[in-house]
Amino acid sequence: MLRLLKVVPTATGCRFPVRVQPRASRDEIVGIQEDHLRVRLAAPPVEGQANAALVDVLAKRLGVRRSAVTIVSGETGRLKWVEVGGLAPEELVRRLKLII
């Protein structure tokens, strides 16, 4: 079954849902689960460590500055909405190297 990442264009870039698994053995982008990106993070969900790790992982993979990646909702939960400034939805998917 083909899984589609839900990417919403915004005025400055695009926004998409991310499901985070903290305290994993390593940082990695797993793929698409339902309509969101699934990311494993080694950082614990304490004092924003997992959120900071998520921003680092996405910024590195997408080739943008950390300041271009913003968690817009879900900071205290596992399901988050992330906005990336300066990237069109098609470019985001290409840089994530996901086949959708």
Image (tube, rainbow, N blue to C red):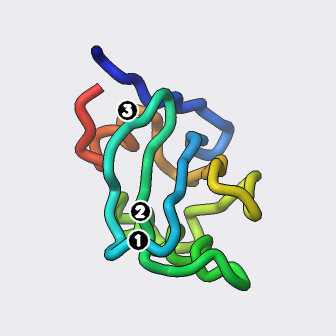
Q: Are marks 2 and 1 in contact (CB under 8 Å)?
A: yes
Q: Amino acid at mark 2?
A: Arg
Badge 1: residue crowd in 10 Å (few <14, some 14–19, many ≥20): some
Q: Is residue 94 left or right of residue 77?
A: left
In this rendering, which labeled residue sits more in front, label 2 or label 3? 2
Q: Earlier in the sequence, mark 2 or mark 1?
A: 1
User: Hey, which quadrant is residue 9 in on the image?
Assistant: top right
Of all residues, the one furthest to the top in this rendering is 1
**Which residue occupies 30% across, 17% down?**
2
- The percent position of residue 98, horizontal first and vertical second, equals 26, 38
User: Hey, which quadrant is residue 72 in on the image?
Assistant: bottom right
**Which residue occupies 58% across, 74% down?**
50
Above or below, comparing residue 77 to residue 6 in the picture:
below
- Label number found at residue 93: none
Above or below, comparing residue 3 to residue 48 in the picture:
above
- Label number found at residue 40: 2
The residue beneath circle 3 is 90
Q: Earlier in the sequence, mark 2 or mark 3?
A: 2
Q: Amino acid at mark 3?
A: Glu
Q: Are marks 1 and 3 in contact (CB under 8 Å)?
A: no
In the picture, the quarter occupied by the C terminus is: top left
Badge 3: residue crowd in 10 Å (few <14, some 14–19, many ≥20): few
In this rendering, which labeled residue sits more in front, label 1 or label 3? 1
Distance from Cα at disc 2 to Cα at disc 3: 23 Å
Secondary structure beneath dot 3 equals: helix
Nearer to the camera, 54 or 45: 45
Q: Amino acid at mark 1?
A: Ala
- Label number found at residue 24: 1
Q: Is residue 79 left or right of residue 5?
A: right
